[in-house]
Amino acid sequence: MEWIGAITAGIMAALGVWMMLDRHLMRVVLGIAVLGNAINLGVLTAGRFSGSQAAFTFAGQSAQDAANPLPQALVLTAIVIGFALFVFALSVLKRTHELHGDKDTDRVSQVTEQPAPDKDEEHAHPPAEEGKA
């Protein structure tokens, strides 16, 4: 069972990296989400999720083949953080589309690399008054 999880995590990681190398920003955001889920699955797989008993025991009992609770807790926390990151990335993507009208990385990079207008230069040289020579 761990082999299936490991192979699936590897395929998902490769797919996530492939999506992150695309020029379309939506695929980049989805690639980040897929890569995060692949890492979560890899951590869960490495934690041996095929235990025959629960991770907790009652007084006087011993757990011979218990599942490891630490990777499960870490993955649960990572799922929440990954979802928050995904929602934030979607909101940044929406704002980028509103400002630049395009979701292509080359176009957005070209627009953002233009120099900003300097407002200080406008205020440093006040217009000449008409009555003075």
Image (cartoon, rainbow, N blue to C red):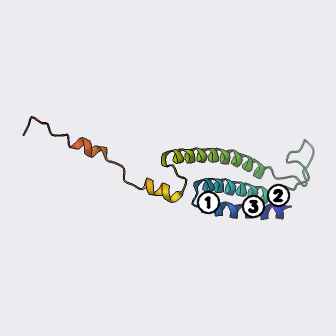
Alpha-carbon span between mark 3 and mark 1:
16 Å
Badge 2 or badge 1: first in the primary sequence = 1
Q: Which mark is residue 20?
A: 1
Label 3: state its secondary structure.
helix
Which is nearer the eye, 38 or 47? Answer: 38
Alpha-carbon span between mark 2 and mark 3:
14 Å
Alpha-carbon span between mark 2 and mark 1:
29 Å
Q: Residues within 10 Å of mark 1 (few under 14, many from 20)?
A: many
Q: Which residue is mark 3?
A: 9
Identify the amino acid type marked 2: Arg
Q: Residue at x 78, y 62 (%)?
A: 8
Identify the amino acid type marked 3: Ala
Measuring from the top left, give residue 94's x and y in whole percent. 56, 45
Left or right, residue 105 beside residue 115: right
Instruction: Name, please, the residue furthest toward the left.
Output: 133
Identify the amino acid type marked 1: Met
The image quadrant where one finds the C terminus is: top left
Q: Residue at x 65, y 54 (%)?
A: 30
Which is nearer the eye, 43 or 53? Answer: 43
Quadrant of the image occupied by residue 50 = bottom right
Label 2: state its secondary structure.
loop
Label 1: state its secondary structure.
helix
| Contact (Cβ within 8 Å) of mark 3 with mark 1 | no
Q: Which residue is mark 2?
A: 48
Q: Residue at x 55, y 46 (%)?
A: 92
Badge 2 or badge 3: first in the primary sequence = 3
Instruction: Name, please, the residue furthest toward the front.
Output: 101
Measuring from the top left, give residue 54's x and y in whole percent. 88, 48
Viewer-side label of 2, 3: 3
Measuring from the top left, give residue 89's x and y in whole percent. 59, 48
